[in-house]
Amino acid sequence: MKPRAKLHPYLMVAPTVLVLSVFFVVPLLRSLQLSFSHWDLLTPPEPAGLSNYDRLISSGQLLGVVSRTVTFGAIVVVGSTSLGLLLAILLNRQGRIYAFVRGAIFSAYVVSWVAVALLWMWLLDGDAGLVSRIFRAVGLPTTNWLGNPSTALYAIAAVTIWKITGYAMVIFLAGLTAIPPSLYEAASLDGAKRWSLFWHITWPSLKPTTVFVATTGLIMSFQAFDVVRVMTQGGPAQSTTLFVYAIYEEIFQNLRVGRASALIVCFFVLLMGLTALNLRAFRQRTSSAEGSR
């Protein structure tokens, strides 16, 4: 066999590096450059120094967007991960009925965001929506779920959880099938109950899967745009203006490209910080697990 040249590994990764450079690195550097300027897409850019960042901080816009996005992401990650794990455990059985239910739950994930948003706009209508009708039927107070600033963010978070839970369930099902049945058999012979089996076998075995599901769920929640654009348009009173939608508003509605670019840079720093914390937590869990062996 012909020996591999030293240049071959670099040639193999070159397409990926090229794609990342064109569609990620170059736009990010361009955004960093534009964040120090004023530009309305109509006239040439003008130097602005740190005024865009100063305006974002002094006006409270940056703090508000960050808090809403982090709150939204935390709700989506905890909700979809917990519900996906519960459904995976309940539906990890053979049979056509279980297969049908698994397929029905996962089907929500493959439906477009626009279709999901339109469906839930009807369901969450404050007057004729099915959710409000059910609340009134059982004597519970109801409200305009998407028109109330105190409930709108939680409403779109619930819709997001409903859509991506099927994805989390499928990943957890794959993780459950990788656990050797002999572990459960040995623990059952020793008298372990269902909760002990879950706490001492299932949950430790699914920790890497949980980290993966939580990470991908966080990424999906931080990319939320369609559901906000269709259901609330960032309102009411900017209660659902998340990071991506705030960037969209600054560019296409306010024609403030410099401030939008500053938001992009801040968004990138936030994502890098959360990723670093996630990797650190994962490494600590891995090292502690290896040390306990």
Image (tube, rainbow, N blue to C red):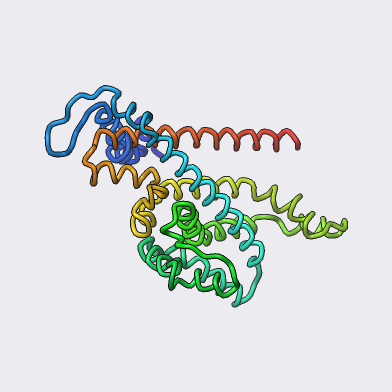
Q: In the image, what residue occupies the spot 23% across and 37% down?
A: 256
Please state if 164 lies on the left or on the right of 9 as rendered. right
Q: Looking at the image, which residue is at 29% across and 29% down?
A: 52
Q: Is residue 4 visible?
A: no
The residue drawn where x is 47% and y is 68% is 107
**Res. 212 visible in picture:** yes
Q: Is residue 18 left or right of residue 100?
A: left
Q: Position of residue 241 (x, y in %)?
A: 38, 47
Figure check: 8 above or below 221: above
Task: Tell which residue pokes out farthest to the bottom in this image.
Answer: 96
Image location (x, y in percent) of residue 133: 51, 73
Q: For the point 19% across and 33% down, which residue is it?
A: 39
Rendered-image quadrant of the C terminus: top right
Q: Quadrant of the N terminus?
A: top left
User: Residue 249: x, y in percent?
Assistant: 29, 45
Furthest-left residue in this view: 43
Give the tally of numbered discs: 0
Considering every residue shown, the one lying at the far right of the view is: 190
- Examine the image and state in which quarter residue 137 appears: bottom right
Residue 27, percent from left and from top: 28, 36
Q: Is residue 109 above or below residue 94?
A: above
In front: 266, or 195?
266
